[in-house]
Structures are given as C-alpha cells and as structure tokens.
Image: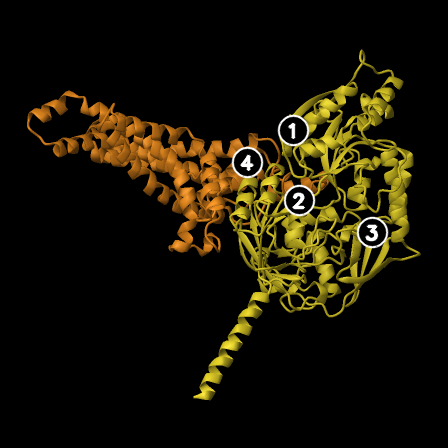
Amino acid sequence: MFPRTLRRASIALAATVLLSTSALADGTLRIGMTASDIPLTTGQTDQGGEGMRFMGYTVYDALINWDLSSADEPSVLIPGLATEWSADEADRTKWTFKLREGVKFHDGSDFDAEAVVWNLDKLLDKESEQYDTRQAAQGASRIPSIASYSVVDPLTVEIVTKTPDATLPYQLAWIMMSSPANWEALDKSWEAVAAKPSGTGPWKLETFVPRERAELVPNADYWDEARVPQLDKLVLLPLPEPNARSAALMSGQVDWIEAPAPDIVPALRGNGFEIVSNTVPHNWTWHFSRNDDSPWNDINVRKAANLAVDRDGLEQLLGGLMVKAKGFMPPSSQWFGNPEFDVTYDPEAAVALLAESGFGPDNPVTVKTLISSSGSGQMLPLPMNEFIQQNLAEVGINVEFEVVEWNTMINIWRAGAQDPSAMGTNAINFSYFIQDPFTGLIRHLSCDLAPPNGTNWGSYCDPEMEELFAEIRSTFDPAEQDEVMRRTHEKFVNDALFLFVTHDVTPRAMSPKVKGFVQAQNWFQDFSGITIEE
Amino acid sequence: MLTYTLRRLAYVIPVAFGVSVICFLLVHIAPGDPLTAVMPIDATAEQQAEMMAIYGFDRPLPVQYAIWLGKALMGDLGTSIATGREVSAEVSRAVGNTLILAVFASMIGFPLGILFGFIAGYFKDTLVDRAVTALSITGVSVPNYWLGIVLVVIFSVNLGWLPSVGAGPGGSTAWKWDFEHLRYIILPAVTLAVVPMGIVTRTVRALVGDLLSQDFIDALKAKGLGRFEILKHVVKNVTPTTLSVVGLQLGYLLGGSILIETVFNWPGTGFLLSNAIFQRDLPLLQGTILVLALFFVFANLIVDLVQPLVDPRIKRG
C-alpha cells in the first residue's frame, strides 16, 4: 500500500516538475509585422530592412554581421561566418576572408568556402545553375564593388573588388548565406527552398503560409552559443494595416507589433503595453537640387531653412516618436563628428542670413518641393511637410508642394531633379536608410552618381567632398575610416547640404510579458535573448 | 430555351475578352513600374533594365498582352514578381478563403434581407416598416470598414470574445470547420453581410409594397384567398427581381472586399488585390482582377439562366 502511495506521490511530483519546467521554457513570441507578406525566405530577403530583420538575420548569417547586442552604443560590424578579413597591403583590391570552422547549415551540411562562392554566384553569375532572379534583384545592388571571387582553401575565400574599396565589409553584411546542399536536395528549385529554407542562423523556419504566417524555432546547434534563442517559437504575421495591427495586439492575438501609428500610442500605453524605441540609422530630409536654377545653391538659404524648422513642435506633432536632427546622421552615431554649424531653431538668425543674401519680406525665396502622400520610412509626410512649410514661411521662404504617390516618387528620385518628371521641383522630401558609408553618405553626393548613374538626386558635385569619399574608400583601418566618416559628415552639416529634420525611432509596441529585448541602434534586431513571462 | 441559353453563353465571349483587355491595360496605366516596389531603392538603372528584360516588361504592350492572354487561356496566369509563386495558385487559395467568407456573409445577409424586406413591405408605412427601413438604410450607408473597426473594438479589444485578425489560429491552410476556427469568421462575415442585407431589404420591400397595392391582389382577395395564399403569389412575383439582385450581391461578396479583408487581415481576394496594388505586382494584379471579373460575368450568366425558370416571360422576350 505504502509503495503505491509513494509511487503516486513521486509521479505527481515529477508531473509538477515537468509542468513547472514547461512554464519556465520560454514560450512563443508572436509578432505583427508591417510587411504585407512573409519576406522572401530563400536567403536574400525582400521587404527592405524589415525583411532582413525578420527573415535575414534570423534564419541566416552574413560573412560579417552587425552587432545587435547594445541599445546604448551605435551598432558596428562584427565577425559572422568569417572570423577575420583583410585587404592585401600590396594590392588593395584583393581581400582574404577566413571562415569560421565547424559551422553547419540547418540541413546538416557544412558551411565552407565553396558555399560562399556558390552564394555569390547565386546573385552575380547569370550563367550559374543556382542564379536566382528574385534574390539577385535584392542582393546584386548591395555588392557593387565585387569583381571576382574564388576558393583559396576550404576555410579561405578571396574576393577581388573593381577598385580599392574599404567599404566592402559593409556591403557583405547584406549578403545572406543559403545552403547549397539543401537547394540540391530540393531538386535545385528555389520555389521548393522557399518552403524549406536552410541557413546557418539562430532560427530555423518550421512552417510557412504565404501572406499569413511563418513559424521559426530555435537552432539549438547555433555556432554562437550566446545567441541560441531562448524562446520555443517565434511566429511572424504580416499585418500591413496599422489599425488591424493595434487591434491584434490589444486583443492578445500577438505580443508585439512593429510601428504602431503615433495616434494610437497613448491608448496602447494606457492599456499597459510598452512602447520600445531607439535611434536608428535613418533620416527624414529635404534633399536639395543643386542644378543651376536652384535657390538652394546659396548656403545662406540652406542654413536659414535649417534654422527655421521648429523641431520641438514637430516632436509634439509626432507624439515624441522622433529624434531631432542635428545633422544628416543621428546625434548618437559614431560618424556624427563635431560640426561647427549648430542645427537648431533660431528664426531670427535665419532672417538675418536671408537678408545677407538680399532676401527679405518684399523679396522672399520661393522653392518648390516634391513630397509623397505616404511611403516606407516617410513617417507622416503630409502634416510634417505642412508644418515645415509654415516654419519656412515665417522666415521668408515660400514653399510650394508637388504631391505624388510613393512609387512615383521613387522613380522621380532615381530620375533626378533635372528630369522633366521632377516637375521643376528643387527639393525632394526623402527618407534615407543610412547604416553604412555608402548608403549613409557617398550615394547622395558623389559626382559620378549624379542621375542617371545613381542616386545623387540634386547633381551635387564638390571636389573637396569627392576627396573625402575617395579617402573613405581607401582607408582600410576601421578606426581611421570612422575618423574620415566623421570629417565627411561634418562637411555635410557645415555646408547645410540637406534640410535636416528628424530621425525615426522605429517604435514597436509590446505586451509586458515580453522580456529581455534589447533594441539595437540598427534596422536589424536580435530576438535570441527574448523570453515570454506567463 | 436552348436558343436563349446559347445566346446568353455567346454573349459571355466578347464580354470576357473585353474584360481581359481592360484588366491588362488598366494596370499599365497606373503610375510606377512593376519593379520599383520590389527592388532595393537604389538599384541602378542598368540592374533595373536587366530585371525588366528578364520579366519581359521591355517588350511592346500588345506583344506582352498576346503572350499573357495565350498563357491565361491555358490556365497559366504567370508568376508573381514579388513572391515568385504561381499567380493561379495564389488566386485560387485566396478565392477559397473569400468563398468561405462569402458563404457565411450570404447565410447572414440574404435570408435576413429577404425577411426584413417582406416584413417592411407587408406592413408598409407602419412603425415596423420605418424601423426596418432605418436599419437597412444604416446598413447601406455606414462605411463597412468603419463598422468593422467598431466591431473589433467592442468584441475583440474590449470584451475579448472574438479574434480580430486572421483566418484561424494556424492560418487558412489549417482551416477546420470547428468553433475554434469559425470564431475567426464571425466579425468579418457580419461586417460584410451588412451592405447586401440592406440592399436586398430595400429591393424586396419596394417589390412587396408595390405588388400588394396592385389590382390583382384585390382580385385574389375577392376570390376569397387567405393571407398565406396571397403571399404565395407575391413571393412568385417578387422572386425574379430578388434573384437578380441577390446574384449581383453574390458577385460582390465573391469579389471579396478590399477594405474588410484588410481590416480583418482575411487572406482572401480583396487582401491579395490590395497587396498586389501596393507592390505593383502586375501579373498578380492582372490575374486576380481577371478571375474576379470573370466571377461577375459568370454570376450574371447563372442568374440569366435561372431567371427564365422562375419567370417564363423573360424566355419569350
């Protein structure tokens, strides 16, 4: 009799222990994304920064990754699938990458130098069997410097650039490594791989319903033990409509939503949800035309406009969800430097600067700006631009708007200010992803990137700036390169080359059950340390 | 009847052809090119041109149309640019989801609409009529996406009774006919049913009211027919017009509502269409519009074919 009671008791005890362990096991995190579809799962993701955040850096790794571990420090590059890299001292176009040993793809195959070359061919070599138009459309433009690449030994890859380019590591942080063996096993079909992808990342894609949901589970064998996910499951739901996203959070269908609309944030806070935000390498500017007839060629006008914008007022308009611009880079950026021109609100100084150039109440400056009605990263373009229009009018700059739809705007941005499609505008309100030297500084103002060759919308060209850009590309020591970046940014600010307005803070709202999330100052984020408290 | 049927079927061919031309051209008139939304924002002109060539967008429009139509006739609607998945598979999955929603909304909207319409028409100009008419006018006039949001706020956010988004706990591919899944359909179906219900109510009310004031009803009464017998005559006379209105509304329901499916994140044709529009996914857009337009064409065809069965006058006409 006694042993039976004992047995029952021990079973009960075991059950309790089991139950309490499962309560401690760290649950499921359900995230409502702003994307309208699950980002491309095969490796090189679509849907911009959000795609890389949820389907890139989760399932895959790059040779060089972004450090996403700190909320306070700006994000920097760290070893990913490559442990070290360097450019040859004698021939700066030749780079050697040492690969991490013992890394396996989710399908169990080895990651090696062959896999790296295979992945670059997937994006760049149209003749290769694994060339994938969809991934190439996303990835090829990220690695414009690469001329060739080859296997040196199983753990060493050589990459040759077209010209010496010290920004190559930043370019490679975009390139995700998918498993060649998995593609072979799935009859060399990328469509089949989409349903059953295999990378080396901390998460494995378990199930995937197009346009509805993706479920990711931890990769217990991840090479970086510190980043093995603690959750049991990560569920991604595309919820493009902002109200639907907020409702899903408030009704408990998801635990986390990206980008809650500013007007719903107070209600979310009032209901006990947490709003997490941090500076991201993003800016919201007016990019000036520098064609002959542009009023923005006058530095006094540019500085006056920058001094006329009441950024505190704008912050109120956005419910506090912005960082006031002090330059092109966010003030906390490692590349901000120490510019002399203080971007602040000083309408009197603005009026004085305009008077210096002969402008006044009887002779106002007249400018025409292209704005969009909505768009990715554009925040709330209509009210924000109307606010700025009023600010500028107060100091004597009259602004007229041409409003276009977002996709049209992108095409006009590519076509340049001189193109007839720009309708004679001399500024464009555009928001920029500015995470690395090329996207952050070079692409906007480099002479050889004036349209139609690139995205220097205003056809700005300045020999001094060209020299700085050349120095960025030819400074191979990261710390020294950062120093050149700072000097370049100082010139951006001192010459008031843009209307510096705000930086986005990528707000996300989450249930108080979500613990351990550190929002890095980056477009990509790490989900490994998160737990759910029941 | 055979000539009538054949004639009706023959009408479908030019209509379907016209629909295909419009579907194809409309999406090309819209601003933005198909690759703008898909490629990274600073892809070079050369890279874009390369992709345009790979997807065949560099050819003249008539050639693109001929190729598209040729494939569409074989049931191949092409491949989505944004996802690389087959358009026909995407559309058929979405149609399935919209169908589930449409069936539910029909089950709510049509019987209630007919019932309310009869009551209002029968008790024309009484308090009951006014109440029902007010209800139906509200149903037709309230923007249904707003109603959807209000229902979500009440039943999902505040009361927590029903889910606000999605098609079941595991997505639409794991759909089951049990309460756990049906909970997801209640709010979108009710929201979707409100407009057709209002329209059907008003149509039936007008028809019934009109019929009851006609002389033959007095004649029937004079013959000594009971209320029920008279109603049977009314039903017979009301049915053809009601049927055609119901048919049109069914087409509307099957088309899926972009707004409602977006508010509830219901993965049907409306949701697919709005995604395709925002991503400028031309093949997907063309395929979806074509299928939806053909739905309308065939819904009308079916109504046209059924009508003579209940109203012999049409056949003779």
Q: Nearer the viewer, mark 3 or mark 2?
A: 2
The colour applied to the residues of chain A in this rendering is yellow
Looking at the rendered structure, the secondary structure element under dot 1 is helix
Residue at the disc numbered 2: A507
Question: Residue B291, image x and y in percent?
Answer: 44, 40
- The residue carrying pointer 2 sits among few (fewer than 14), some (14 to 19) or many (20 or more) residues within 10 Å by Cα, namely many
Q: Secondary structure at mark 4?
A: helix
Q: Respond whether the residues carrying marks 3 and 1 are from the same subunit.
A: yes
Disc 1: which chain? Answer: A
Residue under numbered circle 4: B63
Query: Which quadrant holds the N terminus of chain A?
Result: bottom left
**Horizontal and vertical percent position of residue A109:** 66, 68
The amino acid at mark 3 is: Thr
Label 4 crowd (10 A; few <14 / some 14-19 / many >=20): few
Mark 1 residue type: Leu
Among the chains pictured, the one given orange colouring is B
Give the residue type at disc 4. Answer: Val
